[in-house]
């Protein structure tokens, strides 16, 4: 089976991203999947590469490509239009999880608990919006970009304890972002814990794999920044206690189901004052990922196995969707435990 990994290395981390995707290709080879990595930036370039490579399936590791006039198109939408099977969620779902506030509104509609929040836009009257927010929420609050992932835009000053600090931080962020999110900060609770739940598969038979997030060097107040992730100040350990694991799986299943993610994703969850809260979903996870790997260890899957399990689930979903030319490589069947294959093969 041939897969095209459509990547878009970041300018400031080009070598790191290239190594990561080469690593992914190497791991997939263990399951009999022949992967080609291509750096994609523009619409026409992507179509040319698709015609040249003729992959059986695509793994989009990017959200958008630029069209000739400069507009961006979601790569998953483009693949759907071309009837090309791919691994991961569709365009509508990916665009939803990209915007934290839209995701949180959907969770509220589906009775999935998430911290109280409000959105502040660059063109709005800041003072008026903050006064309205403070009628419904109490300090401390946390303020961050509404459409950024991987903790971008977060630092120790993102947690605010007064109206004056909130206004100062909001003004600073609005210089760089058109829309910011302010929500109740949960990290001050004495029983606070942070979790992440990896998903592999589709439907009610998908695998949900929770892990607890810890920090090697603790910030006070507690916050995980991009720098913490880049400098490996965070680590994850599988949740093995049956009662906590079962509660997290039930909560995660409700949060994921309301959004409609496919094949793989990772949900960030916080526990505060005796209650779980959904924070955000990484719908196009930058795998290989150490947190995802830690989640998979909870059911005995190693790095090679969990990455191939994601592709196994995606291939099976596409077969069920009518792409009958796809076949699971025999090496991939041999690589995964029979029980895992049985779960992921059912839709």
Image (cartoon, grey):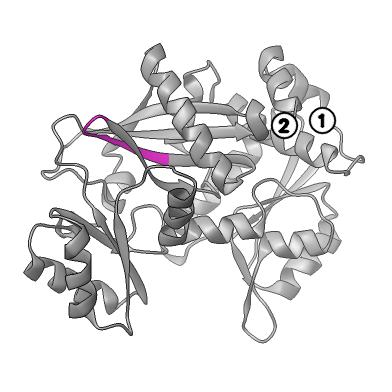
Q: Position of residue 150 (x, y in %)?
A: 39, 52
Q: Is residue 270 magenta?
A: yes
SS at circle 1 = loop
Mark before the other along the chain sequence, 1 or 2: 2
- Residue sitting at 9 percent across and 67 percent down? 163
- Residue sitting at 70 percent across and 26 percent down? 344
Residue on which disc 1 sits: 328
Side of 191 where 295 appears, left or right: right
Q: Position of residue 116 (x, y in %)?
A: 29, 53
SS at circle 2 = helix
Side of 289 where 52 appears, left or right: right
> What secondary structure prevails in the magenta region?
strand
Quadrant where the C terminus lies? top right
- Residue sitting at 82 percent across and 50 percent down? 55
Q: Position of residue 197 (x, y in %)?
A: 45, 33
Quadrant where the N terminus lies? top right
Which mark identifies residue 312?
Answer: 2
Q: Which residues are magenta?
A: 268-274
Which mark identifies residue 84?
Answer: none
Near mark 1 (Cα within 10 A), the count class, few <14, some 14-19 or many ≥20, is some
Side of 72 where 142 appears, left or right: left
Q: Is residue 265 visible?
A: no
Q: Is residue 129 visible?
A: yes
Observer-nearest residue: 176 or 343? 343
Observer-nearest residue: 149 or 267? 267
- Cα–Cα span, label 1 and label 2: 7 Å
Number of callouts: 2
Q: Are marks 1 and 2 in contact (CB under 8 Å)?
A: yes
């Amino acid at each position: 089976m041939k897969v095209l990994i459509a990547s878009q290395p970041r300018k400031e981390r080009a070598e790191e991203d290239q190594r990561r995707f080469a690593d992914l290709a190497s791991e997939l080879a263990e399951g009999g999947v022949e992967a080609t990595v291509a750096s994609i930036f523009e619409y026409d370039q992507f179509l040319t590469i698709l015609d040249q490579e003729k992959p059986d399936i695509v793994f989009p590791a990017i959200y958008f490509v630029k069209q000739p006039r400069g507009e961006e198109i979601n790569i998953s939408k483009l693949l759907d239009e071309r009837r090309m099977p791919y691994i991961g969620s569709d365009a509508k779902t990916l665009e939803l999880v990209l915007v934290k506030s839209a995701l949180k509104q959907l969770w509220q509609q589906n009775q999935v608990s998430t911290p109280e929040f409000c959105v502040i836009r660059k063109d709005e009257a800041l003072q008026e919006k903050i006064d309205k927010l403070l009628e419904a929420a109490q300090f401390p609050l946390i303020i961050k970009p509404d459409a950024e992932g991987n903790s971008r835009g977060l630092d120790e000053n993102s947690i605010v304890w007064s109206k004056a600090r909130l206004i100062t931080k909001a003004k600073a962020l609005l210089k760089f972002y058109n829309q910011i999110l302010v929500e109740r900060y949960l990290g001050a609770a004495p029983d606070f814990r942070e979790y992440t739940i990896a998903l592999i598969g589709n439907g009610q038979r998908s695998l949900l794999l929770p892990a607890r997030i810890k920090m090697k060097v603790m910030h006070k107040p507690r916050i995980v920044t991009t720098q913490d992730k880049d400098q490996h100040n965070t680590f994850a350990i599988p949740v093995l206690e049956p009662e906590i694991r079962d509660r997290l799986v039930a909560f995660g299943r409700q949060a994921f189901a309301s959004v409609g993610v496919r094949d793989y994703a990772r949900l960030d969850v916080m526990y505060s004052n005796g209650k779980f809260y959904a924070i955000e979903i990484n719908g196009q996870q930058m795998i290989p990922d150490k947190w995802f790997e830690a989640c998979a260890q909870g059911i005995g899957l190693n790095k090679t196995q969990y990455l191939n399990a994601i592709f196994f689930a995606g291939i099976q979903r596409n077969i069920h969707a009518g792409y009958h030319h796809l076949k699971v490589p025999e090496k991939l069947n041999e690589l995964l435990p029979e029980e895992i294959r049985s779960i992921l093969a059912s839709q």
